[in-house]
Image: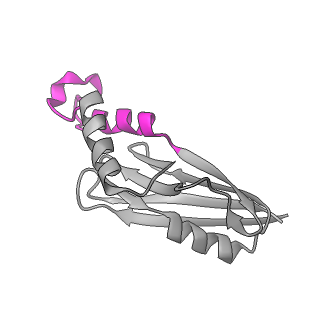
Amino acid sequence: MKSYRKELWFNIPSRCGFVNLTPEVETCLRESGVKEGLLLCNAMHITASVFINDNESGLHQDFERWLEKLAPEKPHPQYAHNAGEDNADAHLKRTIMGREVVVAITNGELDFGPWEQIFYGEFDGKRRKRVLVKIIGE
């Protein structure tokens, strides 16, 4: 069995943003040489997310608005976690959007459904963060 590991690094200039990881993950898959197996992609920071959805900018704007309604950033004192910090909302947003995705690899390709792509979601940006890509298989 083959095993491949790579870290992808990001520095989102704003507090919140989304990045399509699919092209970079497909590059990792080619580098791995795996034709049949599984790919794990996960955020390695507790205020960021990796998820699968459609690559449509209106949808991403909807995510931002929806998440802000569910877990508004301000006022900071509304969260017990924010005693000395200011990112409790980012932790909650990450919990909603998820930590990781697992994708089947079939015939050397990501075995997606229609329109599916992998995204990184940042909820407490303005600093370097990373995503792990782990691939195992034959």
Residue name at image x 48 percent, y 63 percent: 21
Q: Which residues are magenta?
A: 71-99
Q: Is residue 94 found inside the magenta-colored segment of the image?
A: yes
Q: In which quadrant will I find the C terminus?
A: bottom right
Q: Compared with residue 110, is residue 123 higher up or lower down, i.e. above or below?
A: above
Q: Compared with residue 3, is residue 96 higher up or lower down, i.e. above or below?
A: above
Is 78 on the left or on the right of 5, as rendered? left
Q: Nearer the viewer, residue 32 or 61?
A: 61
Residue 118: percent from left, percent from top:
51, 56
Q: In which quadrant will I find the N terminus?
A: bottom right
Residue name at image x 50 percent, y 58 percent: 131
Q: Is residue 25 found inside the magenta-colored segment of the image?
A: no
Q: Compared with residue 50, is residue 73 higher up or lower down, i.e. above or below?
A: above
Is 81 on the left or on the right of 55, as rendered? left
Is 48 on the left or on the right of 100, as rendered? left
Residue name at image x 30 percent, y 33 percent: 88
Residue 51: percent from left, percent from top:
49, 48
Is residue 87 visible in this depiction of the protein? no
User: Please, which residue is most extreme toward the front here?
Assistant: 114
Is residue 32 visible in this depiction of the protein? yes
Q: Quadrant of residue 78?
A: top left
Q: Nearer the viewer, residue 107 or 134?
A: 107
